[in-house]
Image (cartoon, grey):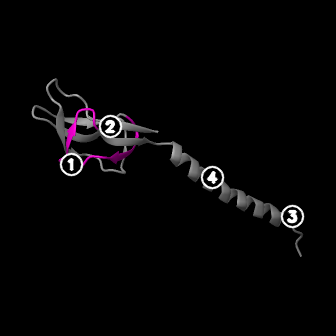
Amino acid sequence: MSVQVKIPAVGESISSGVVSVWHKKSGEQVKKGDPLFTLETDKVSTEIVAEADGVLKTKAAEGQEVKIGEVVAEIEESGAAVETAPAKKEKSAPEQASVAAVADRGRPES
């Protein structure tokens, strides 16, 4: 599941801002509360933080003007895809080894 990172309302008369700098890169692991980017407007400069743990996928470039409410990134929450594939591979290798060991024990020595 992914969490959308939207530009928050930072003042009554402000309708847009600029993503001045990304503190995390696309594809990088982030934790809830980590600063993601700095949003600059005519009146304020503020850091926007991650709302969830996961992998960041940016959709806006540094220096790009963005509107309030616009989705500028997504955080793909950790867990679902990462847990399924490696778990199966780890189990299959020891199972094969144990079958071979049992087969060797059953053979009479010559």
Q: Earlier in the sequence, mark 2 or mark 4?
A: 2
Cβ atoms at labels 2 and 4 below 8 Å apart: no
Characterize the local packing of mark 3: few (<14), some (14-19) or many (20 or more) Cα atoms within 10 angstroms.
few
Report the number of discs: 4
Q: Earlier in the sequence, mark 3 or mark 2?
A: 2
Q: Secondary structure at mark 2?
A: strand
Q: Nearer the viewer, residue 10 or 85?
A: 10
**Alpha-carbon distance for marks 3 and 2?**
60 Å
Q: Amino acid at mark 1?
A: Glu
Please state the horizontal and vertical placement of residue 53, each as a whole percent of the image. Answer: 40, 39
Q: Amino acid at mark 3?
A: Gly
Q: Nearer the viewer, residue 3 or 101?
A: 3
Cβ atoms at labels 3 and 2 below 8 Å apart: no
Q: Residue at x 17, y 37 (%)?
A: 17
The disc at residue 62 is: 1
Please state the horizontal and vertical placement of residue 96, each as a whole percent of the image. Answer: 72, 60
Up/down of 28 relative to 3, above or below: below
Cβ atoms at labels 1 and 3 below 8 Å apart: no
Stretch of the chain drawn in magenta? 52-70
Q: Amino acid at mark 2?
A: Val
The disc at residue 88 is: 4
Q: Earlier in the sequence, mark 1 or mark 2?
A: 2
Up/down of 98 relative to 39, above or below: below
Up/down of 7 relative to 82, above or below: above
